[in-house]
Amino acid sequence: MARQATETKRTTAKIHDQTLLRGDGGELHQTRAGDVAVLTTAQGAPVADDQNTLRVGAPGPSLIEDFHFREKIFHFDHERIPERVVHARGYGAHGYFETYESLADVTRADIFQRAGEKTPAFVRFSTVAGSEGSADLARDVRGFAVKLYTREGNWDIVGNNIPVFFIQDAIKFPDVIHSVKPEPDRGFPQAQSAHDNFWDFISLTPESMHMIMWVMSDRAIPRSFRFMEGFGVHTFRFLDARDESTFVKFLWKPKLGLQSVVWNEAVKINGADPDFHRRDLWNAIQSGNFPEWELCVQLFDQDFADSFDFDVLDPTKLIPEEIIKPRPVGRLVLDRMPDNFFAETEQVAFMTQNVPPGIDFSNDPLLQGRNFSYLDTQLKRLGSPNFTHIPINAPKCPFAHFQQDGHMAMRNPVGRTNYQPNSHGEGPREDPVRGTRSFREPIDAPKARLRPESFADHYSQARQFFLSQTVTEQKHIAMALTFELSKCENPVIRERMVAHLLNIDEALGAAVADKLGIEKLPKPADAAVPPRGDLPASPALSIIENGPESFAGRKIGVLVSNGCDGRLLKALQAAADKEGAIVELVAPKVGGVTSADGKHLPAQHMIDGGPSVLFDAVALVLSAEGAEMLAKEAAARDFVADAFAHCKFIAFSAEAAPLFEKAGVAPDADEGLVPLDGTASVTGFIESCRKLRLWAREAAVKL
Ligand code: HDE
């Protein structure tokens, strides 16, 4: 029996205002009816029914003539583009760069000519190994890629949050990346270096040892993009108006100081909020707390390069800040999130070879290789040589060239002339004065596959990094190495790594070997050249030594219950506001609590969704009943136990005692536990929080 098809009820709006939003920016077509946009196909035809395909009869076969259905599914089927082969997971924001002073004496780069000049910027932060959907707190290097839309072309500083790299020659890049990515037969582990393939490659590649010290340090588990440094890594050149060269290294210093989390916390953050870093940047910018970095340069000449202990072209080495003090030359402010993640953050194409006149490359073999790779990869990922037509990649200065056609060409040369020289007197011509010129470096050398001998010392700076860390940080490095190597199934790989560690620091090698159950220490690895004696410690390399001066930009999670002291909370909020810190309430139920004075206090989190790992410090403002009730809940006990184990400062009202007891924490265990016995004590608590963590507790909690 034929069934009656149900007619979908819908409102047919009268179309009286057809606004076609189709600019070079590629905005969406929109056909407007009053304030309600009418849904159209991509060809602009208004759609009458978007709920049912066109079929013969109610359950009957679908018709191929349903162009709306076909277009919709066709487009959906093609929504994904290849993710970046590395740095797939990332998050971007817009902002500007402000030049502090003219650097005309060293570079003719237009961006550095005028003090106070503001240049639009787009920044993308990323992890390296994981896929686009992986968690933010993987132990990994962070990408720190900056696109500056200067008046003389786009300048991309495609850097990392670590100033050195794993390898010295770009030809090894596919190998190091293959080794860290999921193993090809089994397809795991995702976003992790803790597996045989990675440590196999690393232990066979001594040049990676300096970088390994950095990636096993807390640098690889940053608390926020806002609290990370950025580094251009390679040595570049500045060229002045006469093409005289000065070597330069680029460093970004966060105004809010450095901060990382601890590994046990990172693992839990990944479960509680895999988007922890994204959300942090989004919230900061949306609430007007714009993160800021200073761009610093280390400038030096050939004489310095010749006299320095290491080759300045070796990307596994850095120049300690105590030897060449970074000079601040401008600031970067991020003040606007993209309107659309895909259009901007996903489609942005960074390229090391994007340099304006006045900035030039050095012969660092890694940089030279990158200059090839970044253009090539955009074609694969974005699918057309016209990727510069995408607004996020287009220069914001005037540009003119004869490149034409190709997939998705959005603008082609206008007029008859598409070549030069021409006798029509049309079109752009070169400008030898304004245009990019390279440093005229005389080179007289054989063509060969060579590795400079000056790149051969792989252990001295690794040791310098290790010795420049505080005892706490050194312990974290040992723990990270132990954890990672414990995940290797092959004991040969573990021993080979320990043999390298013994060259970096004997005690470190022995401590890791002990935890790995290696009873007899292996012979230290053969070094290509004998390591130098101890280099002086460089305090600039420690995170703890370079923390913030205040608690600004950090977050306090306050566990509250019905009947809690509203005045205490108000005082806490006021003190946090004064400091520039954020308070979020965590309540037993969604919706919030009612304080003793009858006020409703909305909460941002329910206890199961608001563990203490999401905060930099915590407070417990509870009624006696609330504390009794929460003491029975695992999530509340973990809130306290984790905050304590992660060495955070914890403030608490006297009523919170039963919860402490059940969480296994003595409320008077150390000075990081701050009783709130009146509004004055709140100020003391916020002041303690400036230290971020009470590291002295770490020995007791055995993290
Ligand atoms: Fe990259 N790298 N890289 N890299 N890299 C890419 O380019 C490559 C290296 C860095 O947010 C790719 O557009 C080679 C060092 C960042 O979009 C690719 C070598 C440093 C980003 C590529 C290196 C970086 C990338 C993949 C060895 C720190 C993300 C997608 C010679 C100074 C940019 C893309 C973004 C991305 C190649 C080594 C930083 C394949 C061959 C060293 C921050 O082109």
Image (spheres, helix red, strand yellow):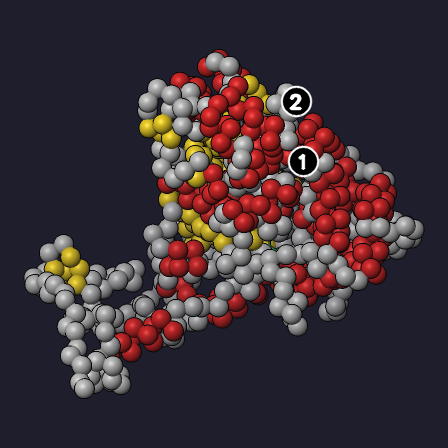
Q: Which residue is mark 2?
A: 670
Tell me how many marks there are.
Answer: 2
Structural crowding at the residue carrying mark 1, measured as other residues with C-alpha within 10 Å and reported as few (<14), some (14–19) or many (≥20): many
Residue 542, labelled with which disc? 1
Please state the quadrant of the image where ligand 1 appears. Answer: bottom right
Nearer to me, 250 or 671: 671
Q: Secondary structure at mark 1?
A: loop
Which mark's residue is nearer the viewer, 2 or 1? 2
Q: Is mark 1 within 8 Å of ligand 1?
A: no
**Would you say residue 127 is visible in this rendering?**
yes
Structural crowding at the residue carrying mark 2, measured as other residues with C-alpha within 10 Å and reported as few (<14), some (14–19) or many (≥20): few
Q: Residue at x 17, y 85 (%)?
A: 2
Q: Quadrant of the C terminus?
A: top right
Apparent side of residue 79 relative to residue 140 in the rendered image (left or right): left
Nearer to me, 193 or 292: 193
**Would you say residue 259 is visible in this rendering?**
no
Residues under numbered marks 2 and 1 in contact, where contact means CB atoms less than 8 Å apart: no
Nearer to me, 668 or 488: 668
Q: Residue at x 50, y 59 (%)?
A: 133
Q: Position of residue 278 (x, y in %)?
A: 46, 47
Q: Earlier in the sequence, mark 2 or mark 1?
A: 1
Q: Residue at x 50, y 64 (%)?
A: 83
Above or below — where is 389 with respect to 652?
A: below
Q: Amino acid at mark 1?
A: Ser
Q: Amino acid at mark 2?
A: Asp
Q: Position of residue 6 (x, y in %)?
A: 16, 74
